[in-house]
Amino acid sequence: MHAPSAGPRAAATIDAILAAASDETRETLRVLGELLGNEPTTAISPTQFATRHLGVDSTQLAATKYVGPTTSLAVLGHLLRLELDRHAPQVVIGSPGDGQPPTWSQLDVGAGEPLPVPGRMIVFFPAGTLADAPLCILINDRHWEREFTILSAAAAKEAAERLLADFRGRMKSSLNPLRGRVLEARVDDGSLRIGVSPGLAAERAGLMLPGPLWAEVDVFLASATTRRDLLRSLGLGTNRGLLVAGPPGVGKTHLVRVIAAELAGSYTTILADANSMRHTIADLYAESDTFGPTLVVLDDIDLVLGHRDGSGHNSSLADFLSALDGVRQREDILTVATTNDPGSLDPAAQRSNRFDTVLTLPMPDAACRARILERHLGPLGLAINFTDVAEALEAASGADVKEVIRRTVLEHGESFTQDQLLDIADSGRWQAAVDRGRYLAPPPPRRRSRAKGVDA
């Protein structure tokens, strides 16, 4: 009689025994295995690990792979950690290959408390944990490899595909600790990194804009709110681009904060710095795969994306246009960019389907300046005629008016007269001193003298 061969069922039984063993028992068996001439665990490749634990040979092994941006891998690592904790007594963790031990990374979720997440490792989940069939999950967060792969027997390929789709769906749910928050993008070691930013709380009442401009903002937001389902049903897409233009100090940044605050929770906001705009713009938009609905904020876009040079080339512009064209294959992506000079942007960046709306914020008129004064000084109950002061601040931006108020409060505290406020406005003490011998700075706005009615 021939002894029965050790097949997949025997291997599965051994794995079940090992999965139920204590850490001390596993370590003892590992040492015994090395003494008997077996390979150390850390020397086993992911393929060898998978075939051993799944009970199949390499020709029967199937790989279901997701390759995504850096943050996707970190969030998938977080979701994998939740499953590790949930099935801790049954899972087996192995080497990611190259004789390296399993490694852990950190996911920045703010408040100075990063979450430890799997970075490079392979994990075996027995049947009945993640799926009816046994599966292995390989994660590798190195930026030149970046993969999240589910290894299974060929017969369990569909189960692996369903599990991967489930993991990707969970990235866009409340299980993702970054979803719906304000994030900052930066370039680190040639790779895009996403971190948590302080909130951008702002209200419309703090920005004095004409009614028609607010109406345009509402039309822009409708693709994410009241008209979202209708646009989808008609096949019109829910992606929109808004270019906010205007001179410094008119409230462009404040408007961006208002938009981000009104979308908080349902949209994740990503603030892009100049380096990430210039070098990793495609990865920046790909992060929508990590968060679902995404608001991308490109501040001072003209500093990075100008016109093509004399030869017709501009690599940053080309990458940006390519990224926006690729965005049309996704859903629920809003782009808000700011610029002091829309004329400095290449026309190709401003056409429809890239920036659908160009919103130019005007310098505040006398009525707006009076409302700014009243908003900030009204609570003090001082005997100040806001209309007269606003007239005296002719050609001042909203930021200029606030700086005059700030300087007055710093000098006089909570009690001062209208003449003291006007004195600071006329003196220019609220402005930063500029060495005009070294810098080509324009002169400050000319104001009308109240006493003589001539240019001051």
Image (spheres, grey):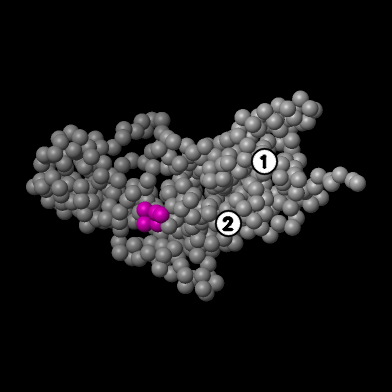
Q: Residue at x 13, y 45 (%)?
A: 380
Q: Using the rendered view, name the quadrant where residue 437 is placed.
A: top left
Amino acid on which disc 1 is placed:
Ile
Residue 432 percent coordinates (x, y): 31, 35
Q: Amino acid at mark 2?
A: Asp
Q: Is residue 412 left or right of residue 437?
A: left
Q: Is residue 395 in sight in this rendering?
A: yes
Disc 2 and disc 1: Cα gap in Å? Answer: 29 Å
- If you read the primary sequence from the N terminus, does the residue marked by circle 2 or circle 1 appear first? 1
Q: Secondary structure at mark 2?
A: helix
Where is mark 1, residue-wise? 17
Does the magenta portion include 264? yes
Choose between 193 and 448: the one closer to the eye.
Answer: 193
Determine whether label 2 and label 1 are within 8 Å by CB: no
Residue 18 screen position, x and y as percent? 67, 39
Residue bounds of the magenta highlight = 261-265
For the residue pair 327 and 153, the one nearer the viewer reads as 153
Q: Is residue 246 visible?
A: no
> Which element is circle 1 on?
helix
Q: Locate residue 414 relative to residue 296 in the image: left or right.
A: left
Per the rendering, the mark at residue 166 is 2
Magenta region, mostly helix, strand or loop? helix
